[in-house]
Image (cartoon, helix red, strand yellow):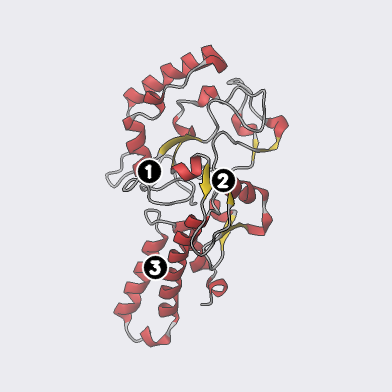
Amino acid sequence: MIYVERDGMDDAGEVIRPDDAWFQLAGNATATAIAEQNKHEANKAIYAHTKVKKALERLFHDKCAYCESKMTATADWDVEHFRPKGRVAERENHPGYYWLTYVWENLYPSCQHCNQRRKDRPRWEDPTELPAGGKVDQFPLLDESTRAMGPADDVHAEHTLLIDPCFDDPEDYLGYDPTGQIFSLNDNPSGERTIDVFHLSRRRLRDFRRETVVAVRSVLKLIANGAIAANASAANDLNAFLENMQAGKSQHAGLARYVAKHPAEFGV
């Protein structure tokens, strides 16, 4: 997971977001939701409108906002509500954040393994049955008394436990080990709950991340090798390659950045 600027711009300097017509549509739908409260039926045609999906794809570099896996080439993905729209798992009497159903800042691109409840199915070399995971309607708080219960309450006063990739810097909370497994830095609760809720420790994701670990470690070793010092061109190419692996557009950039910042932990 990496930080993504919500008001990010494309190469032409245009802010990446749906157009004004969609915001008008979303504003009208929000007014309806507030009037209907918990009886409101979310309109997917609005919150997952094509204008929303193409903006989220571009803003998040065609990656899941949470696990950073590329998602547009081989599978469909969900428009995920950071604050759940229909109900909240941690509080039975909560109506869901219905007033945020169509709010642009509450919408994120998520792979179905992060957003839905999916099994962590056995691997050939790891046949153990592990529990299912995925966000669904979870939204844990450090202090339940701060939870917003309606549109008159300030959601920014909530003591949230989930890392918001457009508000927090995930690199302050998350680390990785040589196997590609993710962990919470200094056992901080936000990192722990984010990993748990989005099921970021699932085995197949860990194994895909391991490939990035191997690639970054190999480049770091080549850069550290004194033999390339005499070849400025090779050194420049390697450094450019390493920078590209850490760029926002690259899959698992957060992991690549962590390895580059902590080479000794990875045997470099």
List the residue tagged with mark 2.
Answer: 132
Q: Secondary structure at mark 3?
A: helix
Q: Is residue 18 visible?
A: no
Q: Secondary structure at mark 1?
A: helix
Please name the residue shown 35% across and 68% down the image: 241
Q: Secondary structure at mark 2?
A: strand
**Lateral position of residue 186 relative to residue 16, left or right:** right
List the residue tagged with mark 1.
Answer: 59
Vertical position of residue 226 compared to residue 195: above or below: below
Of labels 2 and 3, the one closer to you: 2
Amino acid tagged 3: Leu
**x and y, in percent, of residue 44 in the image:** 40, 25
Of labels 1 and 2, the one closer to you: 2
Q: Which mark is residue 242?
A: 3
Q: Of label 2 and label 3, which has the lower sequence position?
A: 2
Vertical position of residue 255 compared to residue 168: above or below: below
Please name the residue shown 42% across and 52% down the image: 69
Q: Can you name the residue that lies furthest to the top here?
A: 35
In the picture, residue 144 is in which quadrant?
Answer: top right
**Lateral position of residue 91 relative to residue 36, left or right:** right
Amino acid tagged 2: Ala
**x and y, in percent, of residue 122 in the image:** 52, 55
For marks 1 and 2, give the CA distance: 29 Å
Residue in front for this viewpoint, 108 or 136: 136
Amino acid tagged 1: Leu
**Quick one: label 3, few (<14), some, or many (20+) residues within 10 Å?**
many
